[in-house]
Image (cartoon, rainbow, N blue to C red):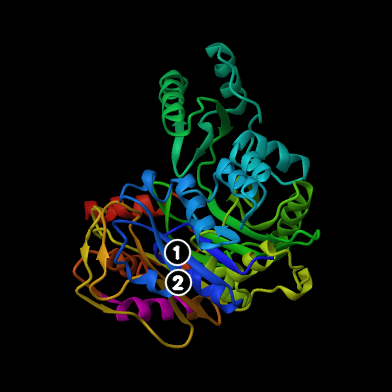
Amino acid sequence: MFDAVLVANRGEIALRIIRAARTLGLRTIAVHSTEDAKAGWLAEADTAIAIGPARASASYLNGAAILMAAQATGAGAIHPGYGFLSENAAFAQAVTDAGLVFVGPPADCIRRMGDKMAAKRAMRAAGVPCVPGPDTPLPQDPAAVRALAEDLGYPVMIKAAGGGGGRGMRLVRTPAELAPALEQTREEAARFFGDPTLYIEKFLTAPRHVEIQVLCDTHGTALWLGDRDCSLQRRHQKLMEEAPAPGIDRAAVAALGARCAEACRAIDYVGAGTFEFLYQDGAFHFIEMNTRIQVEHPVTEMVTGLDIVALQLRVARGERLDLDQTQIAARGHAIECRINAEHPSTFVPSAGTIAALRLPQGQGVRVDTHIGVNEKIPACYDSLLAKLIVHGTDRADALRRMREALDDLHVEGIETTAPLHRRLLRDPAIEAGAVGIDHLERWLWSEAAA
């Protein structure tokens, strides 16, 4: 049991964790770079401590500095949020070795699920359906790789075993593209992930991106909290999410959720996590597991009524989840729009100072944000400003509320993606639901050509 938690992150998610910890009576410590020294969200913590210069590698990614801050301030636990060190197995192990609690799964789980091939092997063993393709590294022999690709059938994807965030993958449509794709992906994998190991999968031509949220305690309870559709993506980065995923048989989702919970028990998973799937032609295909809280967790909270971040902290304190699967149900529909500090057409990052701000309010409207008037938005970090979330009695009601909330949102001083979301919600295909992961890219291309 601990009574103080250090938040090893910044911005929106740091504030979200601080507020959840406060509901449990926990003391909170916020760490920050020199660039964030005057950030408004720091005032919400009981203690704020500088850990390094603006460069993330010297501050928010500096595990040694974060551990020193935790020890200096008497923190008993470290919550990593998402991004930065949240899925770094070495950091999780260092936290544990220092006698502190890492708010997340054990380092071994992070390590196994971070290796995409090891994750596929674990999921197949647990009966979770996977994308077709071997769960072993690609051989060095080009002829053997060509044989694998021919066996799967083009198009195929070449992926880095340690990849993520949209990096370390190449689509190969023809045999002629295979050799250069192998070379480029191997080089990128070594540069970004420190591991040139590659594997191959069948490329699904028109899938949706569907997720299952899970939560597990240290007493053997493993629950799935619902599903989300995250198909609206640009360059593998999500812009809008919703729960539950529209147009998918609820019995099929329940069966998949039960398999995910069973997989968690098999790997001794602890805390919150997300199973990501591609869904096509009525079938689910596992692609990876995120061993942390997701940016889009609020849509699941809105339909279940659960505070997932507070539950993370309670699990980390050794508490038993006082829930069983029969108590968890989705009520209504929720949608989240990510409001980024980017130009709504070119996606060029926009740094500056918030000159004026009006946030939407009203029944069924939630805004997760750290920004305020006169807040400086730096250019050196992720561009996420706010998450605008709405809840409605059904999907049509949620869409209506989101349109109204976007109209109410007003930000001056920087560019944001809010105008893009307003245009997207006029798209008949999005209004109908169940679009594929390629829809947004095609929509943006057609809009630019118009």
**Quadrant (top left/top right/bottom left/bottom right) for the N terminus:** bottom right
**Quadrant (top left/top right/bottom left/bottom right) for the C terminus:** bottom left
Q: Neighbour class for label 1 at 10 Å: few (<14), some, many (≥20)?
A: many
Q: Neighbour class for label 2 at 10 Å: few (<14), some, many (≥20)?
A: many
**Drawn side of residue 108 relative to residue 51, left or right:** right
**Drawn side of residue 244 relative to residue 12, left or right:** right
Residue highlighted by disc 2: 45
Q: Is residue 375 shown above or below 138?
A: below
Q: Are marks 2 and 1 in contact (CB under 8 Å)?
A: yes
**Drawn side of residue 414 relative to residue 107, left or right:** left
Q: Is residue 417 shown above or below 160?
A: below
Residue 100: x and y in percent read: 62, 55
Residue 398: x and y in percent read: 48, 77
Q: Is residue 165 magenta?
A: no
Residue highlighted by disc 1: 30
Q: CA distance from mark 2 to mark 1?
A: 6 Å
**Drawn side of residue 344 relative to residue 125, left or right:** left
- Look at 63% across and 64% down and name the residue there: 312
Q: What is the chief secondary structure element of the magenta stretch?
A: helix
Which of the 4 quarters of the picture holds residue 22?
bottom right
Q: Is residue 325 shown above or below 162?
A: below
Chain part drawn in magenta:
398-410
**Amino acid type shown at disc 2:** Ala
Which residue is more in the foreground, 136 or 40? 40
